[in-house]
Image (cartoon, grey):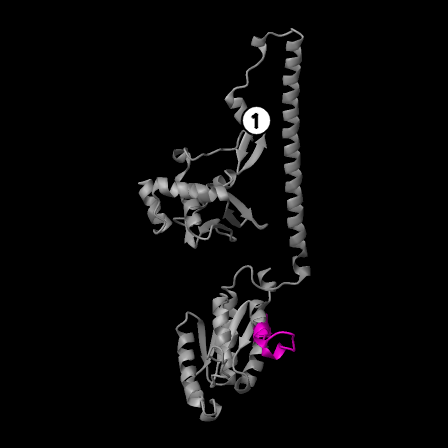
Amino acid sequence: MKNRRKFSIFISSTYEDLKKERQALVGVALENNFIPVGMEQFHAAPTSQWNVITKMIDECDFYLLVIGARYGSIDEETGISYTEKEYNYAKTKGLPVLVLIKQPSAISESEKDTGNDKYDKMKKLDEFREKVKNDKNTVDFFTDLNSLKYVASPTFRNAVNYVDDNAGWVRYRDIVDIINEEAEGRNKANTELGEHQQKMLDDMKEMFSQFYSRLTDLENNQLTLKEIPTATSEDIKKLFQVEDNTLIIGNPEENKSVVGLDDVGNIPVDSAFLLVYAADGDGQILKIRTLGSPTQIFTSGKQFMADNSKRESARWEEALDRLIEWGWVKAVGYKGEIFELTGTGYSKADWLKNNMAIDTSKEPLDELKEFED
């Protein structure tokens, strides 16, 4: 699905001096599966131009800044150019920023700002250029129209490799099968849950029916008080359980492991490490399957396998399976490759980290040695 996504990109620059460059970038963007957006697409609207600009930036996946020979028109309210104002807004919104800068040595005097304030604008342009270069952006340089096209294409291609999984646009027809598949999965899960709850309700009715029958026999003097079975606290616990603030009626599956806060000694160290490192990161665990290689487990960008062997793969897959079985981790999506911690999982992770004294500032394999030696 990833190669079918298209990404919208806002092209920001001064306008009059970079018309040809902007037109060229529109072509390069389309060739690389991007949807270009810029001031050329703006139209009259019952709101300020700045509101229109920010709305367009908000709806884009990338922001492309092109710096040429001019600083541009100054916004009286902020004292900076509208181009720099757009750049600042895109950075505050957290958009991936791409930058193309024309080499100062390739700029002629005729291309620069004119007017009484031209020297002030030239100074502001130099400061803006240095600010952008030192602002952790992807920056490339060009000298003319041909070199602009040459550097822009790989800039677009490389940006796609680091794009957020939630970014981009796809046609409905490309994802309708996936939507239907996920809907069928949810319907099946709901049906199974309904059947399970109905069975629990039937079991409860049967239990109360037997109890009522015993009481009736007692009233008819057919049983002595001593013959009525006593319900122990263990029986009550089996019948009524609370899990994740949800009342569960009936017995859980016999083969399901239940691990509590007092069972740290019963939690395998690899499962504990996987949970704790995930909680200290982005809360996700990735299960990566590649053709011809064992499955690998990652979390927060950290590799847990000591080597690429099937033995190590099986070890960490089982560690993840335990967390899923205990309800501390749940699958996200439909491929079974991305998992997230549940609320209970975060609570368990905090407790395990404190009680096992796991130092997540260390690499997992280094810290793990302290527990395996």
Can residue 312 be seen at all in this image of the molecule? no
Q: How many labels does the image show?
A: 1
Q: The C terminus appears in which quarter of the rendering?
A: top left
Q: Would you say 148 lies left or right of 176 here?
A: left
Where disc 1 sits, the SS reads helix
Task: State the image coordinates of residue 151 (x, y, percent, origin top left).
Answer: 49, 77
Magenta region: 29-53
Q: Residue at x 41, y 53 (%)?
A: 302
Task: State the image coordinates of residue 61 (x, y, percent, origin top left).
Answer: 55, 67
Can residue 348 be seen at all in this image of the molecule? yes
In reply to whether residue 10 is colored magenta, the answer given is: no
Q: In which quarter of the image is residue 133?
A: bottom left
Q: The N terminus appears in which quarter of the rendering?
A: bottom right
Q: Which of 28 and 227 is in front in this view?
A: 227
Q: Which of 180 and 219 is in front in this view?
A: 219
Q: In which quarter of the image is residue 218?
A: top right
Type of amino acid under label 1:
Leu
The relative height of residue 334 versus residue 167 in the rendered view (above or below) is above
Q: Would you say 298 lies left or right of 368 here?
A: right
Q: Which residue is drawn at 49% across and 85% down?
A: 144
Q: Residue at x 57, y 33 (%)?
A: 247
Q: Which residue is drawn at 44% across and 87% down?
A: 106
The residue carrying pointer 1 sits among few (fewer than 14), some (14 to 19) or many (20 or more) residues within 10 Å by Cα, namely some
The relative height of residue 31 versus residue 196 in the rendered view (above or below) is below
In reply to whether residue 43 is colored magenta, the answer given is: yes
The relative height of residue 313 versus residue 35 in the rendered view (above or below) is above
Task: State the image coordinates of residue 230 (x, y, percent, origin top left).
Answer: 55, 16
Residue at the farthest front position:
77
Residue at the disc numbered 1: 239
The relative height of residue 213 versus residue 353 in the rendered view (above or below) is above
Task: State the image coordinates of residue 364 (x, y, percent, origin top left).
Answer: 37, 49
Q: Quadrant of residue 275?
A: top left
